Image: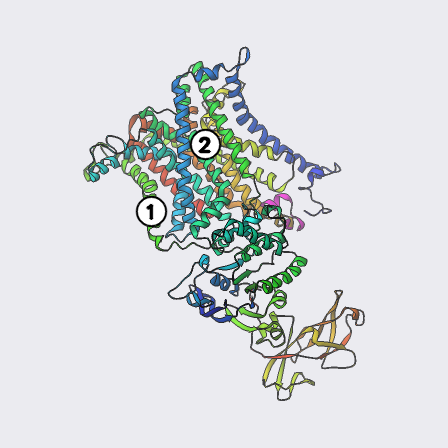
Amino acid sequence: MSSITLTNVWKSYGEVHVVQDFSCQFHDQEFVTLLGPSGCGKTTLLRLIAGFEKPSSGMIAIGKRTVSGPEDFLAPEERGIGMVFQSYAVWPHMNVADNVGYPLKIRHVPARERKERVQEILAAMGLAGLGKRMPHELSGGQQQRVSLGRALASSPQVLLLDEPLSNLDAKLRESMRFEIKEMQKRFGITVVYVTHDQTEAMAMSDRVIVLKDGCIQQVDSPSRLYLEPANAFVADFVGKVTFLPAWAEKGQIAFSEGHNLAYTGTKQGRVRVAIRPENIRLRTDGGILPGILAHTQYLGDVNDCRVAVKDATGNDIQVRVLLPGKTFGHFHQGASVWLDFEDFLVFDANESTDLGKA
Amino acid sequence: MPHGIFHPLSHGFHAKPESAARIWPFDLKTLLIAGIVAFLLLFTVFPMLYLIYRTFIGEQGFTWEAFTRIYTYPLNWEALSNTLITASLAMIFGVLIAFPLAWLVGRTNLYGRTFFRTLFVMTYMVPPYVGAMAWLRLLNPRVGTLNLWLMDVLGLAQPPFNIYSIGGLVWVLTTFYYPYAFITISRAMENMDPSLEEAARISGASPLKTVMTVTLPIMLPSIVAAALLVFISAASCYGIPSIIGAPGQIDTVTTRIIDYVYVGSAEGLSDATSLAVSLMFLANLVLFASTFLGNTNQYTTVSGKSTRPNMVDLGRMRLPLTLLVIIFALVVVVLPFVTVALTSVTQNLGKPLGLDNVTGRFWKILVTRQGIADTASNSLIAASVAATAGMIVACAMAWLLTRTQARGRRIPDLLITLGSGTPSVVIALGLIMTMSGRFGINIYNTLTIMIIAYMVKYQLMGMRTVVSAMSQIHPSLEEAAEISGASWIRRFWDVTLPLIAPSVVAGWFLIFMPSFYELTMSTLLYSANTKTIGYELYTYQTYHSQQTASAIATGILLLVIVVNALLHKLTKGRFSI
């Protein structure tokens, strides 16, 4: 059993609370991602689990063993976990095999057994035959695999990954996403993954924890996060969204005089309507809101449009609309169009979507 | 740098000879390099080559005669062996002290770590002879304060230490040159990605195991470079062996060279030259080795986000280790400085310091005696001029090295490094032999020759400080000014200079300070009118009054503290050595 349980964990530096009252259980063999803008406390949380930081208060347990608590504190080396660092942290003075075999050497695994295990890991990482190479002879992607291999070498039950893909180029990043997920299933380990990249989080996770200013915003599966964001911040951070101010009454939402939307929800008064760009249709023969097509950009697979609409007070708001790429040319810049909403979310008007430093 | 954009400075080298405006930056660069190289060839390379020539070329061509003659004297063999033994031991002890200290201060939750860091870095700026003076007072076999105190406390019949010994020399050399290793190793440790150590911890290694299997091996090139720096500094040192060795009749190569020069005869100069050439070869060999080590960049790693290094929790060892570092600081830094300060107010050195034995007489001498004021003024002028000229060269070199592709821009860099790696006695002797009229230049007995000597020896630190500041300024900042229409002078004045100004000031002081209290070269180059404060102090210490010497030394110490505080503010403690 290698669940991870955090109970009322706080981490403060003086008056600054980096992690606030964090409680959550990561299940055995679950892939959990900590997602949030920089400064949201996600890396600190990971370092708290690793034992590089001590919580100001609260408890952390791995399986049934308390690793950080008021009385107990296990040093990182006593926690039996694997970790992949953003900078890879592959030791430049050891060759690939020595890097991967280091955790086994520390645990006094006999040389022959160690060698076999290292070969096994290298093969699994696609590094077979590179054991004698020095790190500076490897590409960034290969160093990344060495780092992952080393983290898995001693068969840990828990693997922590700290933005492991951020130093790789876009193509490699995509293929590594599959590989990491594959490794997790194959080795049956609990993974805690830190990233600010929502596509990475969506692609790999069983559950995603969205953080802001050290506070949990939502804990959910990627699809629920996307379809049913708990608040405007999550809606904005996960996926693309345009917010339109509106007024909610029973049965309908009014954007401005005469432009209404049927509404079955319970919110009343001033609201903000969040609409994802793929849930909007552009029409010429009428719809919910009229607007002017301000920009249209051909991106190959999609036609990325901005439509300027007016809110109740007459201010211009640019609504993002994603259409299939082949529609490019159907609408011209400056054309009058109508927006039709297939799906939307409603939030209270005073809810912040401020992404801070992100 | 984008091609296709008109870029007179960086592309000046390839500029077509169409307009004068495109040609002249090319000339400026070449002129600058030629000027600096000419200066260095004349005052660094030529004197060194002449020393070699004098040693090996006799009337019938190449000969080992001068070299073999010098080593037929057992005294010189002994001096050589003393130099090698003391420098090697100082190197070993220096690194053994510096590495754990750098680790404790840089990587653990030791109490007061930033304070200790500042303290240990500061000792690097203190003239070594101050240490020699202090330890002479403390560990004199008959009247040493510490010796007497230890005899009293431990009930010993004999004084436990004798400063006039190889051991005494090693002790003072170690305590005054370990900061070189401390600074070098600390800097390397700061530049090391902390996740390399964290990866070891998470792999199951204890803090100690992490140090042994990861930190130490990764730091090895820096540690070796630090060791070589300590070795060559100790081997080239004259201030310490001249004060401690002379009464104990322990000669080193440097003291022998200066003794030979003081003999004054042609033969004396020849013998000095031959010895100097041995020391020069040793130094340049070491310099070459450490440059070679510094260039192995296979240990460069991808740097991640700038996480604060994880501070190793010392746990129960936190207090004991802090106490150990406090004791070390008290013995190695506080005790000698306090001793020198107290000596300066002691009436009678033969009696213990008490209220009846306190005097302000020597401080009065310090401020009233014309000789001291004159020498201080000489030093102030020479050091200021050397620092100012040095920084002009440094700025030009920084520009050439970091902003241009000019051919030959590495040559001055190499020659400046060579000069700085050459022992002071060798530089001074070379200048005496070549600049006293033999080759049409006679600047012997002038302040100019001192200024040149200081520049040759201390230029490097100033240059490195500016170069590293300049290389941290991305060229795009200047390109942005260029694209906004600023001429190169405007660009330098509006963008570059404000950004490197703190480093230029820091570099100035890094040349000024050692030049101001310089002893070795001044001893060889001074004349009746160009005595320096360092030499004046040495004269008082050796011949007249230790108290007056101590008063001067205390004054220098106070200056060091002020300058150091300034440097710390300017560079956040990251100046280069």
Label 1 or label 2, whichever comes before in sequence order: 2
- Against A160, residue B252 (above or below) is above
Residue A14 at x, y percent in the picture: 42, 63
Relative to residue B352, is residue A25 drawn left or right?
right
* Colour scheme of the picture: rainbow
The chain letter for the residue carrying disc 2 is B
Relative to residue B445, is residue A131 drawn left or right?
right
| Mark 1 neighbour class, 10 Å CA radius: few under 14, some 14 to 19, many 20 or more | few
Residue type, label 2: Ile
Q: Secondary structure at mark 2?
A: helix
Residue type, label 1: Leu
Q: Does the magenta segment cover residue B448? A: no
Residue A17 at x, y percent in the picture: 46, 66
CA–CA distance between discs 1 and 2?
Answer: 28 Å
- Residue carrying label 1: B324
What label sits on residue B303 in the rendered view? none
Q: Quadrant of residue A56?
A: bottom left
Q: Quadrant of residue A30?
A: bottom right
- Residue carrying label 2: B232
Residue B256 at x, y percent in the picture: 40, 22
Q: Residue at x 59, y 82 (%)?
A: A270
| Mark 2 neighbour class, 10 Å CA radius: few under 14, some 14 to 19, many 20 or more | many
The chain letter for the residue carrying disc 1 is B
- Whether residue A90 is visible here, answered yes or no, is no
Which residues, given as a range, are shown in magenta? B480-493
